[in-house]
Image: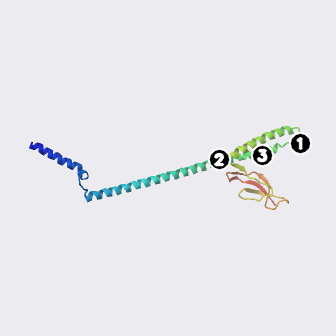
């Protein structure tokens, strides 16, 4: 029995030690363990703040990257559009020349045929211009007597004209075009002298 009592006492002591100081009645933490717990909490707070700030920076970087990529994509689209339209502008010039060549000559036997061909060309030119307008292409408007603007016009010579003020536009030689307010090709004009 004595041995049974010893085992019982050992179990009681082991049970009290397993509960530890925080679980036992009236037990108090030692100052060293309180200090280490507080420093551990501070360390974990700093670590949490570092991770949170890093996440915020990464999120801001991603947002900036997405904005930059959007701008680059838009620039590439505008550049591609500009290149294609620049290649189509000479086709518009050819339509102008074809229309001028097909203007009906009165009294000629072919005047009706020339008129019908001219109508067809005119319709195709209008259709092409309308399509290009949908992509923000606009013709630079030029009239005789307008002030010469180096941003919109290119002077290719002078023409004698007593009705217009010297240095103003006398005649448009070829049309100019703008794409989204950017001049793709200036209007070629002759100035009055």
Q: Which of the 4 quarters of the picture holds residue 45?
A: bottom left
Tag 3: Cα neighbours inside 10 Å, few (<14), some, or many (≥20)? some
114 to the left or right of 13? right
Percent across and percent down for residue 122 are 78, 42
Instruction: Tell me the SS state at disc 2.
Output: helix
Percent across and percent down for residue 174 are 76, 51
Question: What residue sits right under mark 2 in the picture?
Answer: 81
Question: What residue sits right under mark 3 in the picture?
Answer: 96
The alpha-carbon separation of the residues under discs 3 and 1 comes to 20 Å
Q: Say if 119 sits above or below 36 in the image.
A: above
Contact (CB < 8 A) between labels 2 and 3? Answer: no
Percent across and percent down for residue 107 are 90, 41
Q: What residue lies at 17% left-to-right and 47% top-to-bottom?
A: 12
Dot 1 or dot 2: first in sequence order is 2
Dot 2 or dot 3: first in sequence order is 2
Tag 2: Cα neighbours inside 10 Å, few (<14), some, or many (≥20)? some
The alpha-carbon separation of the residues under discs 2 and 3 comes to 23 Å
Q: What residue lies at 81% left-to-right and 44% top-to-bottom?
A: 101
Q: Nearer the viewer, residue 140 or 17?
A: 17
């Amino acid at each position: 029995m004595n041995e049974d009592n010893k085992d019982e006492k050992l179990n009681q002591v082991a049970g009290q030690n397993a509960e530890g100081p925080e679980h036992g009645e009236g037990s108090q933490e030692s100052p060293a363990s309180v200090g280490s717990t507080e420093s551990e909490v501070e360390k974990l707070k700093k670590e949490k703040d570092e991770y949170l700030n890093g996440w915020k920076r990464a999120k801001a970087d991603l947002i900036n990257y997405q904005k930059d990529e959007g701008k680059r994509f838009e620039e590439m689209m505008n550049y591609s559009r500009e290149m294609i339209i620049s290649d189509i502008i000479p086709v518009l010039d050819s339509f102008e020349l074809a229309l001028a060549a097909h203007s009906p000559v009165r009294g000629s036997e072919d005047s009706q045929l020339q008129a019908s061909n001219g109508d067809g060309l005119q319709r195709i030119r209008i259709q092409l211009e309308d399509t290009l307008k949908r992509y923000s292409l606009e013709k630079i408007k030029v009239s005789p007597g307008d002030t010469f603007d180096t941003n919109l016009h290119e002077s290719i010579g002078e023409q004698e004209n007593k009705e217009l003020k010297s240095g103003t536009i006398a005649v448009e030689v070829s049309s100019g075009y703008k794409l989204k307010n950017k001049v793709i090709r200036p209007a070629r004009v002759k100035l009055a002298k």
